[in-house]
Image: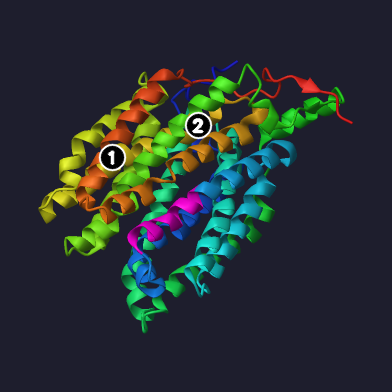
Amino acid sequence: MQNPAAPALRPDGRPLPWYREVTADQWRAFTACFLGWVLDGFDFTILTFILVDIERNFTVGAALAGALGTVTLLFRVVGGIGAGTAADRWGRKGPLMFSILWYSLLAFLSGFSTSYTMLFTFRAIFGIGMGGVWAAAMPLTIEHWPPRLRGLASGMLQSGWSWGFMLSTLVYTYIYPLVNTRPDFGWRVMFWIGILPALSLFWMMKKVKESPVWLARQQQLATVQKKDTVSLVRIFHRDMIGITIQTSLVMGAFIFSYHSLTFWYPTFLKSEHLAPLNFLVLFNAGSIIGAFLWGHLSESRLGRRGAAILAMLGGVVTIPLYLGTSSTLLLVGALLMGLTASGAWGVVPAYLTERYPTAVRGVGAGFAYHVGAGLGSFTPFVIGAMQDRGVALTHAMTICVVISCLLVAALMLMGPETRGREFVPSDDVPVTVGH
């Protein structure tokens, strides 16, 4: 029997290129999840470009504008837990499609807001669908792909968010000026574009197959005529509560880091009288390359922990370039910060899904990711509040970036290495008799 950690071989004994090891079904699962995450990223990050419009239209300060990002992240917890629990009970594919439909509709409705309260409500409910996508999508892909390629799949999947951010940058740069014909219209169009992800559902419904690991689990349970404990309850049992707490804290630090880097970044660039396009394209290009790089390196002796720690420490070193005063240095810093602290996210899907067994993988990873999002959700508000109290935006961002990157490194070090763990239907999760 071939070692699952070894590369597949050609008939002549030479190893196959990694992309030839992935079957058509595995690529389709990846594509569905990748597109869901790209468009999710677009629908969230487009908000960062129109904060000034929202402040002006609804006469609110920076703290309340930042709170729109905070409330979305908080409600991701609801979506992550709900979709993760559904994904463990009824399969990964259905909750993924439902979540995409949900966030597309709420992004669209956000453009019709007539008050700050109405927009705040829509962005809160939008967060439910946003959270659901990650909780259902990541197990679907990671369980499809060969074990030795999980790190690569993880990096490429997580880079979808950066593709979404880059897409929102391009849309804002080239479409916003065309539609911004009056003060209360351009920002609305940016939200209305968010309905487009719903069109991908027709393809997913026909072409994407359910996770083979989840299906094997259901077949095993049917054979013994038993059902799993509700997965949300299971992750709080004595043998798993430590995993749940540690992974949630790790993700809180990751989210803290990312929003310290990105949420107010377009505003920072505008304050320096710089057009955001080149900087954000470089940042997200670096993030895409970095996610692939660190995901790939996480399959080496560095492992998931070593790759994430090294990337985050690189982010700390890059801060003077990322938030410097010279436009040339800022361009270099944008690329390097993308490669390091933002690229570190490439290890996250593999790391979280490997921490949990099959029966609770959807809700376990989804809970940790989105409770982490809840913990880190106050970052946009905190940085906005610091500005309202007289702290320069550059200083506020720097403080938060340093603290968050070091937190990620410390918390990853406290957890176990997961590289190479196998996914098996039986796992170590007990089953209970169904009624």
Q: Quarter holding the C terminus?
A: top right
417 sits to left or right of 212: left
Q: Is residue 66 visible?
A: yes
Q: Is residue 152 visible?
A: no
Q: Residue furthest right?
A: 435
**Is residue 130 found inside the magenta-colored segment of the image?**
no
**Is residue 62 found inside the magenta-colored segment of the image?**
yes
Circle 2 is placed at which residue position? 248
Identify residue type, mark 1.
Val
Identify residue type, mark 2.
Ser
Front one among 272 and 7: 272
Residue 408 location (% of width, % of height)? 36, 30
Circle 1 is placed at which residue position? 401
Total numbered labels: 2
Answer few, some or many: residues within 10 Å of disc 2's Cα (few below 14, many 20 plus, some between 14 and 19). many
First to last magenta residue range: 61-73
**Upstream in the sequence, badge 2 or badge 1?**
2
In the rendered image, the vertical position of residue 91 relative to residue 37, given as above or below: above
Residue 124 location (% of width, % of height)? 54, 56
In the rendered image, the vertical position of residue 155 relative to residue 432, given as above or below: below
Tell me the SS state at disc 2.
Answer: helix
In the rendered image, the vertical position of residue 3 relative to residue 248, given as above or below: above
Q: Which mark, by number, is residue 297? A: none
Front one among 159 and 364: 364
